[in-house]
Image (cartoon, rainbow, N blue to C red):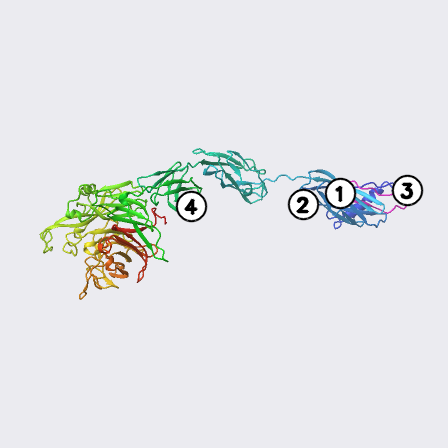
Amino acid sequence: MQGLVRNGCGSECAHTNCCDAKLLLLTNKFAKPKRFALLMAGVAVIAMAGCGGSSKKSTTPAADFSLAVAPSTVTVVPGGAAQTLTVGTTPTSGFTGTVSVAVGTLPAGVTATPSTLSISPGTLGQFTITASAAAAAGTANISVTGTSGMLSHNASAALTVSTPPTPVTTASLSAGAFDFGNNLVNNTLSKTVVVVTNTGASSLTLSPTLTGDASYSIVSGQSCGSELAAGASCNMVLNYLPTVASTPNPQNAVLNLGFGDVAAGTPQTVAISGTSGALAAGKVTTTNNPQVARYTLTLPFPGSVTVNFGTTTSYGLKTWSQSTDSAGGQVSILVAGMKASTAYHMQAAVAFSNGITTTDTDHTFTTQAIPASMSTPLTTTTTAGMTPQPGLEMLQSLGGPIGVLVSDLSGNILWTYAAPGPATDLIDGVKMLPNGNFLMTIGVNSGVPLAGPIPPASIIEMREVNLAGDTIREISVDDLNAQLATATCAECKVTVDTFHHDVEPLPNGHWLVLADTIKPLSPTSTPKLTNLPPQNVQGDVIIDLDQNLRPVWVWNEFNHLDPNRHPYLFPDWTHTNAVVYSPDDGNILVSIRHQHWVVKVDYANGSGAGDILWRLGEGGDFTLVGGTDPQDWQYAQHAPSFTSTNTSGVFSLTLMDNGDGRLFGPGVTCDNAGAIPCSYSTVPVFQIDESAKTATLMFHQKLPFSLYNSFGGNAEELANGNIEYDLCGIAAGSGGGSYVYEVTQESIPQTVWVMRTKPNLYRATRMPSFYPGVQW
């Protein structure tokens, strides 16, 4: 057997083969498979201590033992697996003692376990040799000493502390480039710029570094460490904190992951970029409206702007958001909703498209006084314990002043727009458009052309204006007549005299405008027109203007109604005052005051034939449910509006039932001083069933004679479910002017809020604010 080594046979051997004989015995002893199973074949020879005794010849050798170790070289790896050193003894001359074996001093970080062991003659013992991760690479000897009484022998093995070869692994990056996009100077953006994945079977070492623009830095607590386990992933998170503006040029850097154990050519760099800009202070300027400011801000990157404003730096009110989709784009917002002659603070809040938010500096703006021609007292009262629907009140005043006023619910006038022509000009049917502008009808009352002539200085046009009072688009009646003369749509060949009462903007950007036309009628032209002399009769026309304000559809009442039916104030035959679009079916409701009817017209989003689909009111197509026919129908009504989300089939609507010319059933005696006045106004809510042709009164507030509203007015359901209505034409004996009420929709309505005005208000409507989609 190789692997055990002689170490001096001693002088007492009488024959030269003494030592060879003793080695053979020890060799044979260890050669037994069960006794030396841990020895490895082919291990180099280790020196072995001799056979013991002196050099004197003796015929009786002294008892002794020999000591051997295997393997001849022990190799350990720092932090790696333990290795075994096997120790054996061979007795000679009848040695039967126990041998205590100890390992000598080892290099730092290398340990033997146990530190000592005892073995009997002919048996084996084992030491476990380990090297800590801190052990230094190198070579040394493992010295082993066996002691039994006065006997002592040594053996040794070579020790190698070997650093293992660096394992090679593979790695991948989620991206080779990352763009932070836009950032503001002195604003920190933190982003995961790349995900590192160890795709191999061994640990991956990393040493990330950044070079290039100093705006970038590694967020160490959130980024990859120096080692990544096999199959694991980690994020590299960078901060982007620019200190100077670079726009339009980017700021660039390179992130090197510093992989230490991957094959050459493995991608390990990421190109980093970003563009920084600074927000310049905005500007606040006056406008043509003394209570409106223009706030202008230039954004370095795409984003949106909202202006917060109020009498203190706590602000409290806000505009809508306006945006720009280009770098260096300008956003201009008209700030409305401020009291007259008052100092305000305002500050723009900016939300950039990439999620960054910031604010402009605070600005101050002092409003001017309301123009004297538009100033009028407004008195409001809120019932104790009740809360009106929040918002603003838009008022269309018919005299003293003439034009549009918007107030808060306390009666403070916040915005005005005066009628531009003579006193005969009125502004009617004002609607807020999706772009925040107002659309309005400007012209003389529809009765003026019949009485004629129209004052030559009159301004008759459809006009779109912004909050500053600037005209954005307009079309005059003369321009429209010129277009109608050459238009090819059915019923287009008509001449109109004035715009009046209403205009309906449609979702597709069209305008349905209301105008009048005069036609001479006689028993010859209209055979059934009996007992009336030949005369000019005034009817109305609805004209669909497209986005370019060109007529594309016309509905002429002379072509769809019978002039022989004229229950009220003929020859002002129809006196139409409202057009309401029905989104569900694309048709329109038309309020024809002097017919006491609301009719539904086949408009079909501009492709309809114009047929009257049904007539609501006395003598119409519906059966009245929940009321007394004929007196509980509407008479000389104004401004119907839907109170249900659906607008066809079974739906609900309300209106202002002025009550002029109200009819009563047989045997009913009316007296304005008695229990049943002949003239009274109501605010009904009808549930309409188009199929069953029933009109059911779901709500019906009958007003006392003192609140008889002989003309004008409107009614609508508010967001809180209450009903608001405008009593436009209160009799002088009851104080004149107008009342605007918000009431609960109950069998006995409770007054929540009321406004009293001296001027007659053609309509009053509750607006959430001056800005679509913003509730104040």
Type of secondary structure dominating the magenta stretch: loop
The magenta-colored residue range is: 41-68
- Do the CB atoms of the residues marked 4 and 1 lie less than 8 Å apart? no
Camera-near label (2 vs 4) is: 4
Name the residue: 27% across, 61% down: 697
The structure residue drawn at horizontal position 15% and vertical position 44%, both measured from the top left corner, is: 453
Q: CA distance from mark 3 to mark 2?
A: 50 Å
Residue at disc 2, secondary structure: loop
> What percent of the width, then of the height, locates residue 479?
20, 41
Looking at the image, which is closer to me, 474 or 569?
A: 569
Res. 648 image quadrant: bottom left
Q: CA distance from mark 1 to mark 2?
A: 23 Å
Q: Which label lies toward us, 3 or 2?
A: 2
The reply to whether dot 4 and dot 3 touch (C-beta < 8 Å) is no
**Earlier along the polypeptide chain: callout 4 or callout 1?**
1
Please tell me how crowded label 4 is: few (under 14), some (14-19), or many (20+) other residues with Cα within 10 Å: few
> Closer to the camera, 32 or 621?
621
The type of residue carrying mark 4 is: Ser
Tell me the amino acid under the disc marked 1.
Gly
- Sequence-wise, which precedes: disc 1 or disc 3? 1
Q: CA distance from mark 2 to mark 4?
A: 70 Å
Give the quadrant of the N terminus.
top right
Residue 346 painted magenta: no
Query: Real-space Cα distance between discs 1 and 3?
Result: 30 Å
Q: Amino acid at mark 3?
A: Lys
Q: Position of residue 313 (x, y in %)?
A: 42, 44
Per the rendering, the mark at residue 57 is: 3
Residue 50, magenta (yes or no): yes
Q: Label 2, on which residue?
A: 81
Q: Which residue is mark 1?
A: 3
What is the crowding at mark 2: few (fewer than 14 residues within 10 Å), some, or many (at least 20)?
A: few
